[in-house]
Image (cartoon, helix red, strand yellow):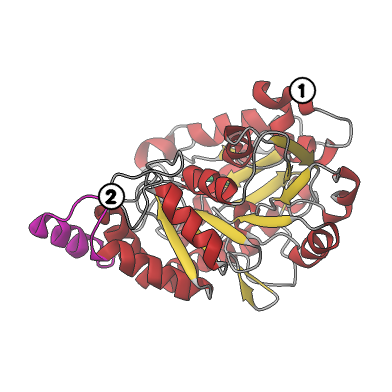
């Protein structure tokens, strides 16, 4: 199994693509000495991101997790408040609720899309429920229409965790414009990156003002060193925003490159028959494929974790689908027997290399490696 791995470069699961104005803009920060959390790139990036999502406000943060925390604080989530999230998500979705002293309530997902199953939400609503946090997992927007209808009926707020879904759409609307607010991540492996970084989007003026207040230690914007609330330092730097603005200028290029990669997978994986189940794309919008995620077919003798090791030996990096929240120590007390799809997806789901720098020859190698290891 080594000839291929020895002679060819390793194919990584994710890699940033910094082929626009990133370098020039960062140098502008250095040359001007505007390297901290004030400067033109922060306001330019926020404005451009709000325009891109079609919302009034975008509030830049130092990462996607602090964006979630800040959004929940601004929404007034506190001790005793319940927030409904899918069990199949990245840990930050749940942790942000915990940081606020809120209570995480878990819902199972649709096994085809990995996204929260709207039909299962209403049964989890109690008098303490304050918000629903759908997560647009792996780049496909959750089925928002029924979620928004349930929220309206019960007077709940909706926060989209859109960390993985920059540019995704739902029935003609952009991710980030669907709920009361939404959060994004610009970590190095996300659709666009600032190294570390995040953003909140909202159309709500009051919510946006509260977010800006809490982002910067809670300092009264009209009275220096006067702090009416306990805030945070969750600011983004001008250097991060410089990279972010350059990334956003070429977002269509980044998304198109991913779509090309997805097209190759769709075509080439067919020869593996039912050994892999390809991702299901709902007809209601653009799936931006943060990760091209397959499930392993039934009847294979090798386990998912063994597949990851065997692919690695052939020079192909892959990742398991997220472990559901309720199987991990901090949230194990939330385990119930109605979270079986999350467990199944977490057990047999596999993220294949998905980034703008991949070539057709790379995808041929990934598929050939899968063909070899899926026995
Ligand atoms: C990446 C991610 C986050 C957190 O973003 P960071 O920038 O890494 O803090 C939150 N939720 C989801 C679903 C993510 O994928």
Magenta span contains residue 360: no
What residue did someone put label 2 on? 224
278 lies left or right of 63: right
Q: Nearer the viewer, mark 2 or mark 1?
A: 2
Does residue 285 sit above or below 310 in this rendering? below
Name the foreground residue: 303 vs 287. Answer: 287
For this orientation, the residue located farthest to the bottom is: 172
Res 189 seen here: no
SS class of the residue under badge 2? loop
Mark 2–mark 1 distance (CA, rounded to whole Å) = 44 Å
Badge 1 crowding class, 10 Å Cα cut-off, few under 14, some 14 to 19, many 20 or more, is few
Q: Which residue is mark 1?
A: 333
Nearest to the observer: residue 257 or residue 220: 220
Q: Could you tell me which residue is drawn at 14 percent across and 59 percent down?
A: 27
Q: Position of residue 201 (x, y in %)?
A: 52, 63
Q: Is residue 366 left or right of residue 343?
A: left
The span shown in magenta is 20-40
Q: Is residue 24 magenta?
A: yes
- Asked if residue 145 lies left or right of residue 188, the reply is right
Name above or below for residue 50 compared with residue 358. Answer: below
Residue drawn where x is 59% and y is 60% of the image: 181
């Amino acid at each position: 199994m080594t000839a291929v791995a020895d002679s060819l470069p390793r194919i990584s699961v994710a890699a940033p693509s910094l082929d626009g104005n990133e370098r020039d803009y960062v140098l502008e920060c250095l040359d001007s000495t505007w390297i901290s959390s004030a400067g033109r790139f922060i306001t330019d990036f926020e404005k451009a991101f709000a325009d891109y999502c079609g919302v009034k406000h975008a509030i830049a943060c130092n990462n996607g997790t602090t964006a979630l925390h800040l959004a929940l604080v601004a929404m007034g989530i506190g001790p005793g408040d319940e927030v409904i999230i899918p069990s199949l998500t990245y840990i930050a979705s749940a942790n942000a609720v915990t940081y606020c002293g809120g209570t995480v309530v878990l819902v199972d997902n649709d096994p085809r899309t990995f996204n929260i199953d709207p039909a299962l939400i209403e049964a989890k609503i109690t008098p303490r429920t304050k918000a629903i946090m759908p997560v647009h997992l792996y780049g496909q927007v959750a089925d928002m229409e029924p979620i928004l209808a349930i929220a309206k009926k019960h007077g709940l707020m909706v926060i989209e965790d859109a960390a993985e879904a920059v540019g995704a759409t739902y029935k003609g609307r952009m991710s980030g414009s669907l709920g009361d607010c939404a959060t994004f991540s610009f970590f190095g492996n996300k659709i666009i990156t600032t190294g570390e970084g995040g953003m909140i989007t909202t159309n709500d003026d009051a919510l946006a003002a509260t977010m800006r207040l809490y982002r910067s230690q809670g300092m009264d914007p009209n009275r220096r060193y006067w702090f009416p609330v306990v805030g945070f330092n969750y600011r983004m730097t001008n250097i991060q925003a410089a990279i972010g603005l350059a990334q956003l200028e070429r977002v269509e290029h980044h998304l198109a490159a991913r779509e090309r990669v997805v097209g190759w997978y769709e075509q080439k994986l067919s020869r593996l028959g039912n050994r892999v189940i390809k991702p299901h794309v709902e007809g209601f919008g653009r799936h931006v494929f943060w990760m091209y995620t397959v499930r392993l077919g039934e009847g294979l003798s090798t386990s998912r974790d063994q597949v990851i090791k065997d692919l690695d030996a052939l020079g192909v990096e892959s990742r398991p689908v997220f472990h559901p929240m309720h199987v991990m120590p901090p949230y194990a007390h939330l385990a119930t027997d109605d979270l079986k799809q999350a467990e199944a997806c977490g057990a047999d789901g596999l993220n294949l290399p998905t980034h703008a720098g991949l070539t057709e020859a790379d995808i041929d190698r990934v598929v050939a490696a899968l063909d070899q290891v899926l026995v």
